[in-house]
Image (cartoon, helix red, strand yellow):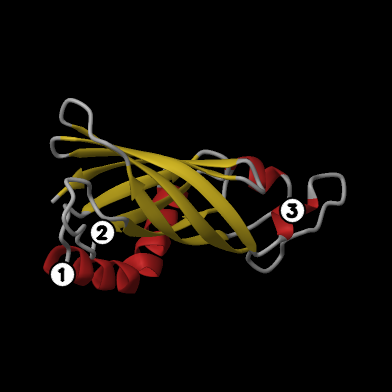
Amino acid sequence: MLKPYFVMLRKSIMLGAVMLAWCFFHGVVLSQGRPSVSFILQPVDLGVGIRADFYPLRAQGTERRAPGFYFSASYGNRGLYREQGLKDHVKATAGVLIPLKPYRGWGFDISFAVNYHHLGPGTIRDYSINQKIYESLSWELGHTVKFKRLVYTYTLDTNRWEPCLGLGLLF
């Protein structure tokens, strides 16, 4: 029963390996802020993936943090999308993190991103559902909460109304 989820996790990790190597290099070696890595879950298609946040810029002459960037990759093949005939949903995201003022040791970011969606072969086009699901590009809005060494992320694909939850660690 769990075998399909481990296959999805393996595909997602393979998809994000190069992206994460690049993000780790820039995030850990060149970052001026605290980079983070999160495990992400997409409830709509039971997709799993990895997200990396980093802050390569330095805010000059202010106490505020400089904007950062994030990248994520995920793979899903179950849930509501499977029932609608969509197969092998791969999602790659690149976005900007805009830091907000810290509050009592908690850090907050809002995020804006662009998503690229790829649907695998064998996807059946259903005209009774929202046709934006079949578009390759979409926009994403979200927020990030950081406390001590933990990171919580929530993003929402505005075209598909597809949420994505993440939990990770700060470095």
Q: Toward which corner of the image does residue 99 lie, by quadrant?
A: top left
Q: Toward which corner of the image does residue 167 lie, by quadrant?
A: top left
Mark 1 residue element: loop
Mark 1 vs 2: CB contact within 8 A: yes
Query: Left of 169 or right of it: where is 159?
Result: right
Mark 3 residue element: helix
How far across and how far down the image is residue 150, in percent? 20, 37
Tag shown at residue 162? none
Look at mark 2 in the image and give the residue it sits on. Answer: 54
The amino acid on which the numbered mark 3 sits, given as a three-letter code, is Lys
Mark 3 vs 1: CB contact within 8 A: no
Task: Tell me which numbered mark, 3 or 1, is placed earlier along the sequence.
Answer: 1
Q: Residue furthest top?
A: 104
Query: Left of 151 or right of it: where is 2?
Result: right
How far across and how far down the image is residue 116, in percent? 56, 64
Image point 67% across, 48% down: which residue?
159
Look at mark 3 in the image and give the residue it sits on. Answer: 132
How far across and how far down the image is residue 49, in percent? 39, 53
In front of the other: 17 or 156: 156
In front of the other: 38 or 56: 56
Tag shown at residue 30? 1
**Residue 165 appears in the picture as rendered:** no
Instruction: Estimate the spatial distance between the alpha carbons at disc 3 and disc 2, rounded to whole Å.
Output: 30 Å
Relative to 49, is 153 above or below?
A: above
The amino acid on which the numbered mark 2 sits, given as a three-letter code, is Phe
Mark closer to the observer (3, 2): 2
